Amino acid sequence: MKRTTLAAILLILPGIGVFLFFNLYPIAYSIYLSFTNAQMGNFPLEVTSELEVTGIDNYAWIMNDPGFKSAFMWTWIFVAISIATKLLFGIILSLVYNSKWVVGKPVYRGLLMIPWALPILFSVSVWRFMFDPVFGPVNIMLESIGFSAAWTIEANPAFFAMIVIETWLAYPFMMTVITSALQSVSQSHIEASIIDGAGYFQRLFRVILPIAGKPIAFATILTSAASFQFFMVPFIYNSALFEDRFLLLYGYRKGFASSIPHYGRAAAAMVISIIFLAIFMYIAMRITKIQEGSR
């Protein structure tokens, strides 16, 4: 082996070791726990207790639990709705930003990047106040037209609030990617479509967006995965209210917030979530074909 190759291996070994310890080891250990009876009373292990391998019992229990079925269904509903809203707002704001009629673009873009800059704890706390049923500005404005909702108490209004908050938190990412994709479209293509008599929306949907499609599809897949793993926002907002609405929150509450925490079942829920997410990512990558042409 050449000295340069050996030196390179020695230099990257510490990084590989840290990666394996902080990434692969927790995943492998969680998979192991999902096949055991780990719960409050026998884990962490005491002198007189030990874990027992229970096979797929935890997975069978999870798959038959109505709470898991509800969380699974609502998670996908949330992913579908939030992706549509984030994509819509991202495209609209990017088109406005790219317009030649917009002045003060640096200020405009800086203001739109605010959700990225703020800590998520602060953002969710502010939104929770905004949706407060009594003092929140949302209900105060809605009461003027004879409508109000218990945004922080009832599950369905709170679920709608989650979509609003997720859209607000994620649109800067979508806007940044879509703006870059739109700016990469050659001006000659647009000019050719104008010469052919194409209107604005014809140019947008038949020329601009198809050319910028792959970066937009890639951003959509990434933010879809983030929506599937939605946890911190509902946890801060009201974790008990969303146990049967979000998969990761369901798994967390089974392991840490239930009357009898069962770590094995919580680990099984997380493993199932990872499997479904991996399947979704694979199908999305194949459908969009964004890997084609990459080296």
Image (cartoon, helix red, strand yellow):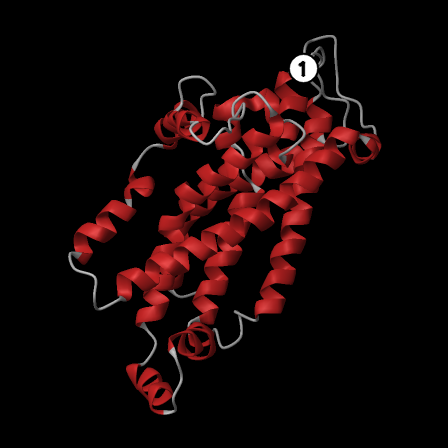
Left/right placement of residue 181 relative to residue 77 reads left
Please identify the quarter of the rendering in which residue 139 is found: top left
Q: According to the image, label 1 marks what residue?
A: 45
Element on which disc 1 rests: loop
Left or right of 35 in this view: 17: left
**Residue furthest to the bottom:** 196
Whether residue 108 is situated above or below residue 95 in the rendered picture: above
Outermost residue on the top side: it is 48
Quadrant location of the N terminus?
bottom left
* Residue ID at (62%, 68%): 287
Q: Circle 1: is it few (<14), some (14-19), or many (20+) Cα within 10 Å?
A: few
Using the image as rendered, state which of residue 18 and residue 257 is in the foreground: 257
Res 127 visible: yes
- Residue 113 position within the rendered picture, expressed as x and y whole percent measured from the top left: 29, 46
Instruction: Name the residue at 72% across, 21% down.
Output: 38
Between residue 87 and residue 120, name the one nearer to us. Answer: 87
Residue 179 placed where, x, y %?
A: 33, 63
Is residue 41 depicted above or below 217 in this figure?
Answer: above
Seen in the picture, residue 44 relative to 120 is either above or below; the reply is above
Location of residue 140 by image quarter: top left
Which residue is pictured at 47% across the width and 43% down the height? 19
Q: How many numbered circles does the render carry?
A: 1
